[in-house]
Image (cartoon, coloured by chain):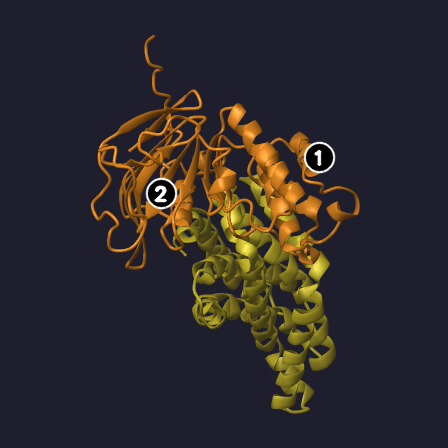
Chain colours: A yellow, B orange
Amino acid sequence: MWRDAALVAGKDLRIEARSRVALSQVAPFGIVALALFAFALGPDRDVLARGAPGLFWVAVLFCTVLAVQRSVSVESADGARDGLRLSGIDPAGLFLGKAAAVGVQLLVLEAILVAGVVLLYGARIQIPWMVGVSCALGTIGLAVTGTLYGALSSGLRMRETLLPFLLLPIVAPVLLAGTRIWQAAMVGGSPGDGTQWLRLLVAFDAVYLAVGVILFGPIQETA
Amino acid sequence: MAPAAPSPSAVSLRGAVALSGRFPLLAGVDLEVAVGETVLVEGPNGAGKTSLLRVCAGLVPLASGRLTVLGLDPVRRRTAVRRRVGLLSHASHLYDDLTVLENVRFAVRASGGDPARIAPACDRWGLTGRLARTPALKLSAGQRRRVALAVLTARWPEVWLLDEPHAGLDVAARALLDEAVAEASAARVTILIASHESGVVEQLADRAVTVTGGRVTAGRVLGAPASGEDGTRSTDGSGAASVPTDGPGAPDGPTGGTDVAHGRGRVAHVA
């Protein structure tokens, strides 16, 4: 399973390194989204700084949808998905590999968006490690749910519109917990304020990792 | 001299029905393919040839009936079966952003194949030098076909399912393909070839079966004395000279009894 996961993740990251879709299209889209939020909320830096945690995670969710759609479309062209199925690759390995590749891309995008939030909104992070942990846990949750729902929608003709519709409500706990942890990290209070939300993220990740490992194979065969 | 004992089945379909939504892809196929046998699958467009190969590869599940590949159930033993089966389909299964060599490497490693076979396979299909480093995006249709064939020959599975394998290939590549099929056949690889180019494939195959309306409606032995005037056998074992392959005259019922034929020194079962 791990060998297959590494093989698939390496393949997807190599494709991304060649095509640079995440860096040349998704990252600018995320920055544009942050700028548009700023335009909508006005020039008041206090308002922007207070809203920064939620706006950051909303931008991350939009980027997740694009990254997952790209991950799905890579397998849709020239029957590549059938090629993967025919190879007899371990479905759990395939799931973990694709999720890992999406996760690595999301981490890079989040680093860019964190810089965007700090520069555009004047957000000040008092407890950086808490933001780092929330990003790491949130990324795992988004990558595994995105990969799972991406597979679910991959066989459908309307997948481009269906994926956000399916995925965004499911990842609402990531948005909620991530935002609360960021708020705690920005206020600079006790780290305990964000711990319960970190637990929620850990539970979310664990549940969807397990569901993905178990169900990705059957979903791939039926989608 | 006692007749040769039948070889074990590499592919066995009994009353196989496959659906796409409510549309029948296969409507009750009975087919036995012995280990090491090469079978040409003929039939008009939309007859179910591609569906038959995809079912045998385990890509399309059966709605009813029974399928075993190399004695295994492709649903319950999915990974085990797929690692021993290779499908050359209309699609090449290539990633446009990866080079030729990267595509072959990935496909072979993903299927648990021997990496040592990658270089010889690429050499065989002329995928060397600059072409090996070319992204798949820039390849012609024929070159993509060569890459898919390189993957197949590098993997060298026990069952080859070839869907219109000559399509898009130039004369040199067609000769290479025929050579590879002959070599695989000599190595007792089981091969099903769906093709409209019967004249070409008949030279490679032990027998031919005709698929019409999602059923196997006729079978004939190749390279052996014909049973009927034109070598065509009806699948009910009546020995009729020909069976309509399309239209209202095509048989409706499931195919009948077992007709054992000896072609090119092998035992072939036409169910």
Using the image, tell me which numbered label, if any, was put on residue B119.
Answer: 1
x, y percentage for residue A103?
60, 57
Q: Indicate the quadrant containing the N terminus of chain B: top left, top right, bottom left or bottom right.
A: top left
x, y percentage for residue A70?
58, 63
Q: Nearer the viewer, mark 2 or mark 1?
A: 2
Q: Is residue B221 left or right of residue A86?
A: left
Chain name for mark 2: B
Q: Which residue is mark 2?
A: B210
Q: Indicate the quadrant containing the C terminus of chain B: top left, top right, bottom left or bottom right.
A: top left
- Seen in the picture, residue B70 relative to B45 is either above or below; the reply is above
Mark 2 lies on a secondary structure that is strand
Q: Name the residue at 57% across, 28% down.
A: B183
Looking at the picture, which amino acid does disc 1 mark?
Ala
Q: CA distance from mark 2 to mark 1?
A: 37 Å
Looking at the picture, which amino acid does disc 2 mark?
Thr
Q: Is residue A39 left or right of residue B38?
A: right
